[in-house]
């Protein structure tokens, strides 16, 4: 029985949220049941992700291969639970459960009645299922399909906000995301033209053997993939859709969009770069230098843009642009420390940015204020919410004992190993700029006089979600342990693939 569960668990983790999403519209009038179903499937995903991660760690990185329909690769669709897949699956489960818990008491205010809330949960589970598929798929065409499911779900989540600006932000997002999808599909097409395969393993083997026969086609594939996923993940200057989309969306949607959706596209790019092209071809075409350069530019430009924002959620949205730069920079370091630090920072940022958006959403829901200067004294009125915001801010800056420090420290080690002193300087400068746009919020919240208004922390599920995420930030900063080990193994596996 245990063997059967283990054998089918990879596909079950992907299908379960998709199946529940299909059922939810019929239960729209029973909102308590809808919310309990969403939280239950998220909890099952967390248990399943922990179980698969433990197996991968115990087997010292030997992947679990699941062949859909019993058809073996390259003819069939293959799911691969290796160190990278187990790592990202664990991140998805850890972050999405508290967000679903937070949404229980938040959606009525931001989304509306029962039917609109039920539709929100449908889109939420579709996105979670697509992200789980991105983590495990080993097939290029399925990468495209899952990216499209995630993109359409994200557009729906942005438009779920009961606000006129939501329609404009959604339309902008949809147009640019469609452009990104076309480029990703074009890149997959170029790979298929050259190799005749869509399975990542077989495509990589064939590409390593015959790429010199079609060097320009391979360069076009690289270019299309980088720009396509750059648009999807809001890499500067391809980020123009993100500030409006993330700031207008309902708070749980902002949290999962910035915390997980962007990371899903980055994981897909990482798998294509290392599992299909390989680091040898990346060096041949100097792709690693391009990644480091655009990453450094994004860190500085995103941070400076965040400094100029008075709207709290827009400041956090531009911060995401800067943090995406750290991940692109790490992708180009081509060493184990740098890649391990990048993956851990990706996980850390997922937790931190989800906490920031949820706590900011709670503040805005209670006060009705969106400008930072209008939140004076809120730390004394809403202690739990503001404490969660403070913990996540310290983590994002990279203060020791918080999860962001561990990721940035390994990124610095990877930069030193690559003899790239400029990237070291940019990582440190980015942290200083991050402090410059987050510390003023904390100062206003705690050290300025509070108005005589009845501001209170949100209800119990929301407070519990904020506390759980804050605990994860601290635990990963103090004892990164198994998650860092899993990230290190994933980095080592990516670098040995050719």
Image: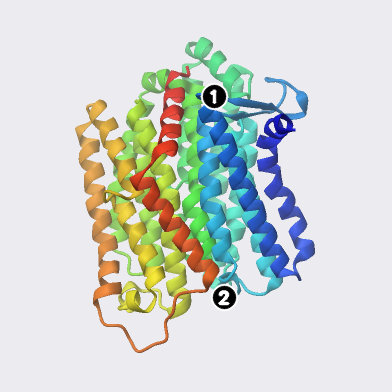
Asked whether, in this view, residue 193 is left or right of residue 481, the answer is: right
Q: Are marks 1 and 2 in contact (CB under 8 Å)?
A: no
On the image, the x and y values in percent for residue 495 come to 42, 22
On the image, the x and y values in percent for residue 54 come to 54, 34
Q: In this view, does 122 lie above or below 368?
A: above
User: What residue did someone put label 1 on?
Assistant: 59
Asked whether, in this view, residue 224 is left or right of residue 388, the answer is: right
Examine the rendering and report whether any part of residue 331 can be seen: no
**Which label sits on residue 109?**
2
Q: Is residue 114 above or below residue 297?
A: below
Q: In this view, does 265 lie above or below 20?
A: above
**Which residue is at the front of the view, 5 or 145?**
5
**Which label sits on residue 456?**
none
Q: Is residue 388 above or below residue 258?
A: below
Asked whether, in this view, residue 460 is left or right of residue 447, the answer is: right
On the image, the x and y values in percent for residue 72 come to 72, 20
Helix, strand or loop status at disc 2: helix
The quarter of the image holding the N terminus is top right
Residue drawn at (43%, 66%), measured in percent from left and top? 359
On the image, the x and y values in percent for residue 330 come to 35, 35
Asked whether, in this view, residue 189 is left or right of residue 215, the answer is: right
Residue drawn at (29%, 31%), measured in percent from left and top? 414
């Amino acid at each position: 029985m245990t063997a059967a569960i283990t054998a089918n668990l990879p596909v079950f983790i992907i299908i379960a949220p998709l199946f529940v999403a299909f059922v939810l519209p019929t239960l729209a009038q029973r909102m308590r049941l809808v919310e309990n179903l969403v939280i239950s499937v998220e909890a099952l995903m967390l248990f399943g992700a922990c179980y698969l991660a433990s197996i991968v760690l115990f087997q010292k990185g030997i992947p679990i291969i699941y062949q859909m329909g019993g058809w073996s690769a390259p003819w069939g669709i293959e799911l691969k639970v290796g160190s990278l897949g187990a790592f990202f699956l664990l991140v998805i489960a850890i972050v999405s459960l508290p967000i679903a818990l937070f949404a229980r008491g938040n959606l009525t205010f931001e989304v509306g009645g029962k039917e609109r809330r039920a539709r929100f949960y449908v889109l939420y589970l579709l996105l979670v299922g697509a992200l789980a598929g991105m983590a495990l798929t080993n097939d290029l065409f399925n990468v495209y399909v899952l990216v499209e499911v995630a993109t359409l779900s994200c557009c729906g989540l942005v438009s779920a906000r009961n606000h006129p600006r939501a329609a404009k932000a959604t339309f902008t997002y949809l147009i640019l995301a469609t452009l990104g999808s076309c480029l990703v599909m074009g890149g997959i097409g170029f790979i298929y033209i050259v190799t005749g395969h869509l399975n990542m393993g077989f495509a990589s083997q064939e590409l390593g053997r015959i790429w010199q026969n079609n060097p320009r086609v391979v360069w076009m594939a690289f270019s299309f993939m980088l720009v396509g996923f750059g648009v999807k993940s809001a890499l500067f200057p391809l980020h123009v859709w993100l500030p409006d989309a993330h700031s207008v969306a309902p708070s749980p949607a902002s949290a999962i969009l910035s915390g997980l959706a962007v990371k899903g596209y980055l994981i897909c790019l990482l798998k294509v770069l290392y599992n299909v092209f390989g680091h040898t071809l990346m060096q041949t075409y100097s792709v690693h230098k391009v990644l480091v350069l655009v990453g450094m530019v994004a860190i500085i430009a995103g941070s400076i843009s965040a400094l100029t924002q008075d709207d709290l959620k827009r400041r956090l949205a531009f911060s995401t642009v800067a943090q995406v730069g750290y991940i692109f920079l790490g992708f180009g370091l081509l060493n184990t420390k740098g890649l391990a630090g990048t993956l851990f920072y990706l996980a850390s940022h997922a937790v931190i940015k989800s906490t920031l958006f949820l706590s900011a959403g709670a503040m805005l829901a209670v006060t009705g204020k969106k400008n930072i200067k209008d939140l004076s004294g809120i730390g004394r009125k809403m202690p739990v919410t503001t404490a969660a915001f403070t913990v996540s801010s310290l983590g994002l800056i990279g203060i020791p004992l918080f999860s962001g420090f561990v990721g940035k420290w390994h990124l610095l080690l990877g930069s030193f190993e690559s003899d790239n002193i400029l990237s070291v300087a940019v990582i440190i400068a980015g942290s200083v700029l991050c402090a410059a746009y987050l510390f003023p919020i904390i100062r206003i919240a705690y050290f300025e006089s509070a108005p005589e208004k009845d501001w209170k922390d949100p209800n119990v599920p929301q407070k519990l979600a904020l506390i759980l995420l804050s605990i994860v930030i601290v635990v990963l900063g103090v004892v990164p342990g198994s998650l860092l080990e899993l990230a290190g193994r994933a980095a080592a596996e990516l670098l040995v693939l050719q």
